[in-house]
Amino acid sequence: MQASVGADIESICRKCGDVWHVVVAMVGNDIAKVQCKQCNGLHKYKNPDVAKAAAKEKKKPAKKRAPAMTAAQKKAAAAAKPKGKATVAANLDLPTKPYKFSDTFVSGQRIDHVKFGTGVVEDVLDGSKIEVYFPEGRKVLAIKKEESTLATLKEARPAWLNELKATKSE
């Protein structure tokens, strides 16, 4: 549709909702501003066909997500690790360590956490997390990745990146 300044056109007014407007400004062949004939409000041109299509899109119901865990799965997970006691016995041969991100821990080791108190490491998860049983419940705490993992990552990086890092450090 070819319109010019001063021509009547359909647009949606944000103030009163009316559709009949007069073209006030154009940029190239595109309508930039219009004035409502009902309330005399000036605003950007809003194509009513595009607005109707957007309104239909909004009315479509959102897709429902599948639940992360079903009730049966939650019960099975809860039954796997009893709430009231640790699944791993504390190794009394190892000293109690204060929790630090940079330390390494083994299963059965006792740790002393500033907020949660004394707990027992139940599991080391993927080398960067530990699952710890505290009297108030289980917590997953972060730990520093093992050096062997970091070395593997450095070896896997492209040669040009190693050269770039070497030139920056010199």
Image (tube, rainbow, N blue to C red):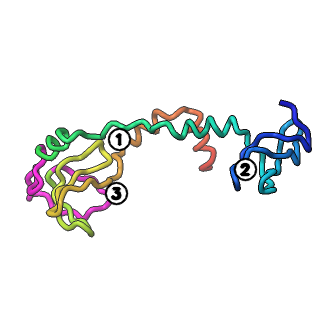
Q: Tell which circle, 1 or 3, labels the residue nearer the N-terminal end.
A: 3
Marks 1 and 3, how far apart at CA: 14 Å
Does the magenta run of residues contain 96? yes
Residue 89 sits above or below residue 116 on the image? above
Q: Report the magenta residues as a range.
A: 80-107
User: Alpha-carbon neighbours of circle 3 within 10 Å: few (<14), some, or many (≥20)?
Assistant: few
Task: Note whether 116 is above or below 105 in the view shown.
Answer: below
Q: Residue at x 82, y 40 (%)?
A: 9
Seen at 91% across and 43% down, the residue is: 5
Name the residue: 36% across, 45% down. 147
Q: Is residue 81 left or right of residue 19?
A: left
Residues tagged 1 and 3 counted as in contact (Cβ below 8 A): no
Q: Are marks 2 and 3 in contact (CB under 8 Å)?
A: no
Spatial CA span between label 2 and label 3: 61 Å
- Left or right, 129 with reference to 6: left
Where residue 164 appears, as percent x and y from the top left, is 61, 41
Identity, as a three-letter code, of the amino acid under mark 2: Cys
The answer to whether one can see residue 26 in this image is: yes
- The image shows residue 56, relative to residue 111, as above or below, that is above
Q: Which residue is mark 2?
A: 13
Residue at far top of view: 1
- Earlier-in-chain disc, 1 versus 2: 2
Q: Give the mark toward the camera: 1 or 2.
A: 2
Badge 3 element? loop
CA distance for labels 1 and 2 = 64 Å
* Disc 1 crowd, CA 10 A, few/some/many (<14, 14-19, 20+): few
Magenta stretch secondary structure, dominant: loop
Residue at mark 1: 148
Q: Amino acid at mark 1?
A: Ser
